[in-house]
Amino acid sequence: MPTIVSIIITVIITLSITVTQKYLGTRKYWQLGAVIPIISAIIMSILFYTMNVKLTAKTIVPCVIILVLELFIWLDSRKGYRQKEFNKMKAKDI
């Protein structure tokens, strides 16, 4: 039973981070989308240096995947924001 609870908690945390990243990426100020990747990088570096986690492929690859996915979400959000703004400007021209 504890493993199911930990899996559910992990899924909830992951979804909340993803939704927050998507929301911050679609704001007017593009810098807000960088908040989550920067916080993730800081937390990962703290874990590596203070907890003495060995730098192996087994520990680095998941961290890199997480950061890359967060950056892709940010870039996709920015593209959607620009497209929305472009559509607003196009509608005002007509």
Image (tube, rainbow, N blue to C red):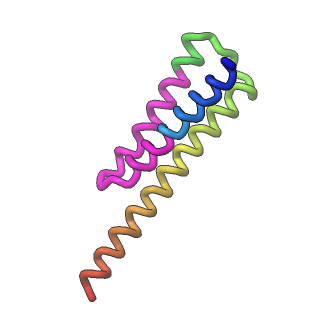
Residue at x 52%, y 46% (from the top left corner): 71
Q: Quadrant of residue 84?
A: bottom left
- Whether 38 is drawn above or below 59: the answer is below
The residue nearer to you, when weighing 76 against 4, is 4
Residue found at x 33% / y 69% = 85
Q: Nearer the viewer, residue 19 or 28?
A: 19
- Quadrant position of the N terminus in the picture: top right
| Residue farthest toward the front in the current orientation of the protein | 1
| Pick the front one: 14 or 42 | 14
Residue at 38 percent across and 47 percent down: it is: 24
Magenta-tinted stretch: 17-45
Question: Is 21 within the magenta?
Answer: yes
Residue 73 x %, y %: 51, 50
Residue 92 on image: x %, y %: 24, 81
- Residue 78 sits above or below residue 67 on the image: below
Residue 15: x and y, percent? 53, 40
Q: Kindly identify the residue that appears in the image at 29 percent across and 81 percent down.
A: 91
Q: Nearer the viewer, residue 21 or 19?
A: 19
Above or below residue 76? Residue 85 is: below
Q: Is residue 36 magenta?
A: yes
